[in-house]
Amino acid sequence: MIDFKNGFFKLTPVDVASVMEKVSPLMVEGEGIVAAFKTVRDSVVFTNKRIIAVNVQGLIGKKVDYTSLPYSKLQAYSVETAGTFDRECELDLVYSGLGTVRFELGRGCDVLALNRLISSYVLA
């Protein structure tokens, strides 16, 4: 299961092509990537159907955990924008049975656009 709460590195936006090889085998027909974020080894990919968290484990990174968080099961979510001294943004997702999943996003993230993206899939 994912654990971005205790990581030193924050997720930063990356080009969709840079994560395509890792997540494309997991995607279903009609699913497309709409946004991607990455740390040094881990990544979070937002598709039009779900959020896929990729957690690379171990020293050499051969073991990888893929966590799928479907928008259809999302009960609530919140975003926290960066401040003057706190430059990170946070995205909290609440899932029944799983609890709250938090993604800490570094500089360069438009967290309000991310909120609109999630809203377009959850509220549709």
Image (cartoon, helix red, strand yellow):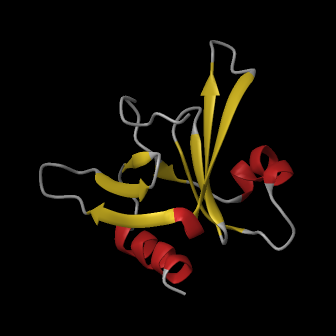
Q: Residue furthest left?
A: 85
Is residue 82 rendered to the left or right of residue 31? left
Compared to residue 3, the image places residue 75 above or below, namely below
- Residue 5 % position (x, y): 36, 36
Is residue 64 rendered to the left or right of residue 75? right
Q: Which of the two residues, 124 or 98, is positioned nearer the viewer here? A: 98
* Quadrant including the N terminus: top right
Is residue 103 rendered to the left or right of residue 29? left
- Residue 94 % position (x, y): 39, 57
- Residue appearing at x 40%, y 47% in the figure: 99
* Quadrant including the C terminus: bottom right
- Residue 97 % position (x, y): 47, 48
Q: Residue furthest front?
A: 97
Q: Which of the two residues, 84 or 30, is positioned nearer the viewer here? A: 30
- Residue appearing at x 83%, y 63% in the figure: 28
- Residue appearing at x 35%, y 73% in the figure: 112
Q: Which of the two residues, 111 or 71, is positioned nearer the viewer here? A: 71
Compared to residue 46, the image places residue 60 above or below, namely above
Q: Quadrant of residue 113?
A: bottom left
Compared to residue 43, the image places residue 55 above or below, namely above
- Residue appearing at x 40%, y 30% in the figure: 7
- Residue 67 % position (x, y): 62, 43
Is residue 89 rendered to the left or right of residue 19? left
